[in-house]
Image (cartoon, helix red, strand yellow):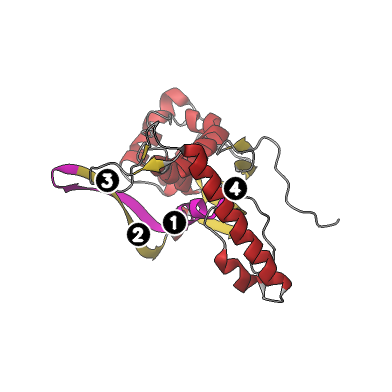
Amino acid sequence: MTLARLNVPEDAVETLGDGIGFVALVDRMQCDPALKVVNSARISYEKNRDGFDPAADRGLVRFLWEHGHTSPYRHSFFTFHWKAPLFVFRQAFKYQVGSGWRKYEVDGQAVSLEVFDVQFDTDKGCSWNEVSGRYVQWEPEFYVPPVMRTNPPHGNKQASVELGEDFDHEAERARMRAECERAFELYTERIERGVAKEIARMCLPQSIYTQAYWTVSLQGVLHFLEQRLKPDAQFEIRSYARGVFDLLEEELERLGVTRESLGA
């Protein structure tokens, strides 16, 4: 067998509408994840089922999740292949360490803030492995937003809204693209002068695309979707959350999990 460059997997879900970014499901465990949840819970009573019965079992899976009894959700794992801009990965990588959304009140306004805990989130079962810019020379693939956004006047720093029609979106897109291309020229010139890739990459923008594998438990998937499908999540990572949901929609529906129940 020979090594080959990464290709777009079959059934990949396009995420950002630019023909570059995607998320794909490349591996799943064979056993029905819904059945695993109920059987791993019922083993406490030395009981199990041969198959998942939605009418009888959805109440149990809902009770377990709503009351924080999440260990039964950590017996099923999925592996996803992402191609995304660096800044999206830096948000997604928080699902390997503890982080979460908390709501505060600031000047009478409800504000959602992302809280980062310096503690590895091992019990949710997550692992990321990314293309290394130390070993691989990047390709000139950049994400440029289709429209520009601005922060609203209220205190929610996570929210953004589209700039009005009087704003020249195309001109701003062209400027961003030119800046990215110039940074990439400097990067390649530096490598040609003998500078190591691990140093040369330091000038590259956060919008450059890279790829990674994400292996995650069912609990980790639900935690990710609960936070990143919400309207106040950044548009770009919300697009990847939608892709993950689409890829697992059949499994999630068996558990009674819908976009609406996740707050999307």
Q: Which disc, if any, is residue 94?
A: 1
Q: Which sits earlier in the primary sequence, circle 2 or circle 1?
A: 1
Location of the N terminus (image quadrant): bottom right
The vertical placement of 69 against 147, above or below, is below
Cα distance between the residues tagged 4 and 3: 28 Å
Instruction: Determine the image quadrant of residue 72.
Output: top left
Let me know if residue 71 is in the magenta part: no
Query: In terms of secondary structure, where does tag 4 sit?
Result: strand
Which residue, given by chain and number where applicable, does mark 4 sit on? 82
Cα distance between the residues tagged 2 and 1: 8 Å
Cα distance between the residues tagged 4 and 1: 15 Å
Location of the C terminus (image quadrant): top left
Which of labels 2 and 3 is toward the front? 3
Q: Nearer the viewer, residue 234 or 67?
A: 234
Q: Which disc, if any, is residue 156?
A: 3
Viewer can see residue 158: yes
Which residue, given by chain and number where applicable, does mark 2 sit on? 116
Q: Which sits earlier in the primary sequence, circle 4 or circle 2?
A: 4
Q: Nearer the viewer, residue 122 or 118?
A: 118
